[in-house]
Amino acid sequence: MKVLVIGPGGREHAIVRALSADPYVKEVHCAPGNAGIAQDVTTHNIDAQDPAAVLALARELASDLVVVGPEAPLAAGVSDALIEAGIPVFGPTKAAAQLEASKAFAKNVMAAAEVPTAMAHVATNRDEAASALDDFGAPYVVKDDGLAAGKGVVVTSDRDEALEHAEACFAAGGTVVIEEFLDGPEVSLFVICDGKHAVPLSPAQDFKRIFDNDEGPNTGGMGAYSPLEWLPENFVDEVMERVAYPTLREMEKRGTPFTGVLYCGLAVTKRGIRVIEFNARFGDPETQAVLARLKTPLGGVLLAAAKGQLDDAEQLNWSPLTAVDVVIAAENYPDTPVKGAVISGLDAANALENVHVMHAGTSTDADGNIIVSGGRVLAVVGLGDDLAAARKAAYAGVAEISWDGAQSRTDIALKAERGEIVVADQSK
Ligand code: AMP
Ligand code: GLY
């Protein structure tokens, strides 16, 4: 089969690699891709958020399946255009992608489906925001009710800062969701859905803040690892029963069945599992770690999902190895990144055993150099027998790569390696 992958990032590079390794996939294309993806497959420079442009390319390539990576093309209706034309697409319709695009919508679905999540109030002005903050108390959680690439959320104990963020959202014409603070380790679980049926991938953990020790502002994600040895034994089954299936049933009931990845962002609190957020796509950088371990050919699973032919009973096969990936970001990220620097050391990193470099914000300059062209630039994936070995591999790769101003965290998966992640006793 021929597959077209839509998106420009590290997640798409990992998806392209996994599809290229599937013996049933004869051809992989990507649009727009990046400099690293272009070394692996043919890329096409189109506006990936324009449904008509994606449809035209899928027709030209005679694609048997289109896989949509990021949220923006989903929210723009790329899947709808492909479905209407009869081309199988892995990725939800615009209506179903509301689960990510609107936090208020997601809360409404969770309430109807009795999915456990943080208590929340929607506020449309300063007075409502202030009273919601005082209802819940510190630490305060204030979220912009729209797509903000993971950067629209402020978690702080400073009431003035919380209120300031709310006002900034109102000033931009938006509403905010103010929530109860969820205390406990976070887990990303990606569930492959075909509208009715669902198959979970292996859980991962993401590192959202820019600096070590989870300090500094939120980013799109600075690193990840999988699997999570510290999770309670029935964790995945419980998320499927209490979160994924009820959500799928509710979406179906509303006439907007969900096909694609239901990304469950979860907190393991002392009162049990709580949904922090849903996304309607694979996570980045978790996907780079998760797919590095998937042994089941990816193309067949995604095509079955796109066609509504997923079997709940499908068991995916996983490598026994552990995967860690570390993001290297541009200078000044998550603010406006400094672009243009030439990246060195990519070949040396890729030459290391058990190390694979996934590209995100990279492009090629007139002299053929690979240069920085986005905020998150690379994700260096390391595989190993355990977390210590996987971290060592990933960081050996990071050490080979350099440009002026490059930033990466030094503590991705470190707490887990040291056995310092504590899950509260759920039996009380
Ligand atoms: P979101 O965009 O909803 O994923 O939020 C980004 C990050 O903010 C999450 O990954 C959490 O680290 C944090 N966060 C969001 N909501 C909460 C909450 N209710 N309690 C604690 N932390 C939260
Ligand atoms: N890693 C977080 C996200 O993809 O939203």
Image (cartoon, rainbow, N blue to C red):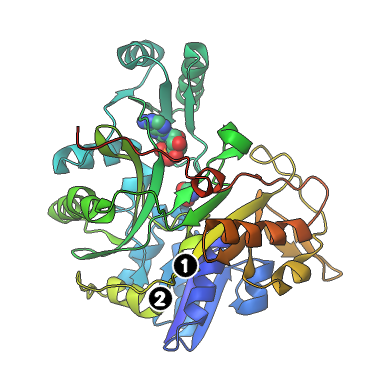
Which residue occupies the extreme front position in the image?
Answer: 418
Queried on whether the Cβ of the residue with tag 1 lies below 8 angstroms from ligand 2, the answer reads: no
Q: Which mark is residue 298?
A: 2
Q: Which mark is residue 125?
A: none
User: Residue 186 or 68: which is nearer the viewer?
Assistant: 186
Which residue occupies the extreme right position in the image?
Answer: 367
Residue 25: x and y in percent read 45, 86
Residue 72: x and y in percent read 47, 53
Closest to the camera, between mark 2 and mark 1, is 1
Q: Quadrant of the C terminus?
A: top left
Q: At 22% across and 38% down in the image, what residue appears? A: 116
Total tally of numbered discs in the picture: 2
Q: Identify residue for label 1.
A: 291
Q: At 66% across and 37% down in the image, what residue appears? A: 335
Residue 93 as seen in the image, left or right of residue 168? left
Q: Residues within 10 Å of mark 2 (few under 14, many from 20)?
A: many
Identify the amino acid type marked 1.
Leu
Q: At 30% across and 72% down in the image, what residue appears? A: 306
Q: Is residue 144 visible?
A: no
Q: Quadrant of the N terminus?
A: bottom left
Q: At 63% across and 69% down in the image, what residue appears? A: 356
Verify CB contact (< 8 Å) between mark 2 and mark 1.
Answer: yes
SS at circle 1? helix
Residue 405: x and y in percent read 79, 45
User: Residue 25 or 422: which is nearer the viewer?
Assistant: 422
Identify the amino acid type marked 2.
Leu
SS at circle 2? helix
Residue 202 as seen in the image, left or right of residue 168? left
Q: Earlier in the sequence, mark 2 or mark 1?
A: 1
Q: Residues within 10 Å of mark 1 (few under 14, many from 20)?
A: many
